[in-house]
Amino acid sequence: MTDIGRHPAAGSSQGLTVRGISKRFGATQALDRIDLDVRPGEVVALLGENGAGKSTVSNIVAGTFPSDTGRMTWQGRPYEPKSPGDAIQHGIGLIHQEMRLLPDLSVAENVFLGRLLRRRGRIDRAEMNRRAREQLRRLGLDISPTRLVRTLRVAQQQQVEIAKALTLDARLLILDEPTAALGGEETDHLFERIDALRKDGMSFIYVSHRLEEIARICDRVVVMRDGQCVATHSTAQVPVTQLVEEMVGRSIERIFPDTGAPRPREVLQVRDLANASFQDVSFTVHEGEVLGIAGIVGAGRTELVRAIAGVDPVTGGSVAVEGRVLRLRGPRDAIEAGMVLVPEDRKAQGAVLDLSIGDNVALPNLDRIARRGWLSPRRVASVAGDAIQVMTVKGRAGQPVRTLSGGNQQKVVIAKWLERKPKVVILDEPTRGIDVGARAAIYEVIADLARSGMAVIVVSSDLDEVLGLSHRVLVLSRGRPRGILRAAEATDAAVMRLATA
C-alpha cells in the first residue's frame, strides 16, 4: 500500500467553515463551541472515541439536526441546512457507518433511491444499471447492479453505500468509517477514488478508527474528546501513539496485549471443509491459541467461520471439537459442543437492539439461567451485572442495547456468549467500527481468553489486528487456503502475497 500524494487546496474561502457550534441533548453537552474548516480539495480527519462528538458534528453539517449555537458558511455563503435533503441540494452528503440500504431492492435501485432516472416518463433501468455498474467497478466491486442488496456481504453493502454517494453531485462528503468492513485492496480502490475526486476540488470529512489510514489519505487532523476539539494538526503525518493519547486523554503504550503461549492440546480440528464459497480448508486450533484468518474481501473468511459454527451448510469435510466430530445441522449443534460465533454484523445478527443488556445476555443462556423452567428477573439482572463488569460495558442491565455505543454493543454480544464458558470462540470482525478505547478493551478480553486456555479464532479486515493478536495466521484467497503462517513469519507482505495468489 502506497501513500497518496497531496494536492493544493484552491479557494479556501469557498469551503466549509464551522464556528462555535454547540449541542445539548437533555443533560448531556454533546458539543461545546466547536470550530472546523474544510477547504476545497482537502481531506480532513475527524478523530475521537465513541461519544467524543464526531457524529454530532457530522449530523449538524449534514442537516440531520441543527446546532444550539454557532454558525456555518459553505462556499462563501451562510449555511443552515433544514434537513439531509437540503444539505444534499447544497452539495453536502453523509455516508453513515451503519448501512441505510433497502435489502429487498436491487443495487442500482438503492444507488439511485429517491432520484430514479427516467426516460420518456418511465424509469430508465438500463441507464441506472449502467451508471451503478460504472461506480461499483471504480471501487473494485464487480457485482451485478440487478442483484438484491440482501444477498450481499457486509463489505459489499458498504461499497454500495459509497457508490451511492459518489453518484450525487456532491462537493463535500462526510465519510463515517467508510473502510470498516473493507480489506486492503478494497480500501486502496476507495482511496484512489477519493484522490481523483479531490483533484477536482471535492472535499471530505473523514471519520475513522483505523488510525493507520489517516496519514495515507488525509491532509489535516482534528481530534475531539468529550465534545471539544482538543488538538488540531496541520499535517496528517502524526504518530499514531500521539493521536491515541490525544483521543483518550492518557498514555496507551501498547495496543495489542500479550496473548501468552498456546498449549499442545488440540481443541478444534477442521478437515477438508468445503461448500459453495470455499474448498479444502484444513487447520487445527490449540488450547490458548489465537488463530487469525486473513484474506481480501471475497476470500471466503466469513463464509468459512459461519460453516464451522453450523450457520451455513457444508458439502464436504468435517469439524471436530476435542476429537468429537460434530454433526452440524445448525448453530445449536456447535453451541452444545462448546463453540460459539460472534458475527460480523452486530446489529443485524449479534444483538436484539430493542431488548435490554440483561435480556440479550440471557437469550442464549436460558438453559443455564432459568431454574425449573422459570426465568427470574433478579437472576437475569445478576448475570448481566457480572457480564457488564467483566466486559466493562458502559451501561445498566435494564438499558436497551440500541442506546449503547457501537463498542459497548459489541461487548454485550461477546459477553452473552462468554457466559456459556465455551471451548472455542470465533470472532468475525470483532472491532469493526468501534473506537480505540473499546478496541483495546476487546483485545484484552481476547488475550484473557487465550491465556485461560480457550481456543480463539479472529477474522478481521484489519491486517494489523490479525497480526497483532494471532499466534498463527491462516490466509485464504478466492475460497482456498494458501498457507498458515507462524507469528514470526506473518508480516504484511507475506500475508498479502498469499492473499493475492
Image (cartoon, rainbow, N blue to C red):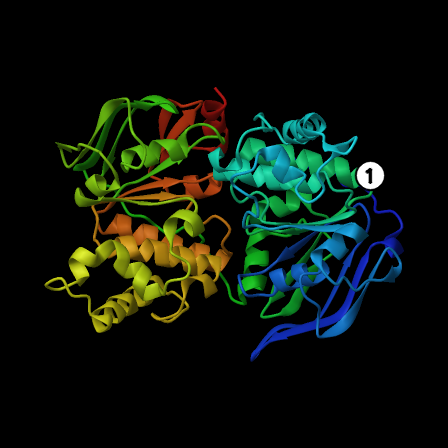
Q: Number of callouts in the render?
A: 1
Residue 356: horizontal and vertical position, in percent?
Answer: 36, 65
Locate residue 476: give its quadrant.
top left
User: Can residue 1 be seen in this snapshot?
Assistant: no
Q: Is residue 246 above or below residue 100?
A: below
- Residue 118 lies left or right of residue 11; in this view the side is left
Residue 152: horizontal and vertical position, in percent?
Answer: 49, 34
Q: Amino acid at mark 1?
A: Asp
Q: Is residue 363 above or below residue 482?
A: below
- Residue 98 lies left or right of residue 377; in this view the side is right
Residue under the point 61% across and 60% down: 55
Locate residue 360: give its quadrant.
bottom left
- 56 or 441, nearer to the observer: 56
Q: Residues within 10 Å of mark 1 (few under 14, many from 20)?
A: few
User: Can residue 57 be seen in this snapshot?
Assistant: yes
Q: Outermost residue, bottom direction? A: 27
Q: Which residue is mark 1?
A: 200
- Residue 7 lies left or right of residue 290; in this view the side is right
Residue under the point 33% across and 54% down: 414
Secondary structure category for the residue under label 1: loop
Q: Is residue 331 above or below residue 375?
A: above
Residue 46: horizontal and vertical position, in percent?
Answer: 65, 56
Locate residue 131: give its quadrant.
top right
Q: Locate the N terminus by quadrant.
A: top right
Q: Outermost residue, front direction? A: 121
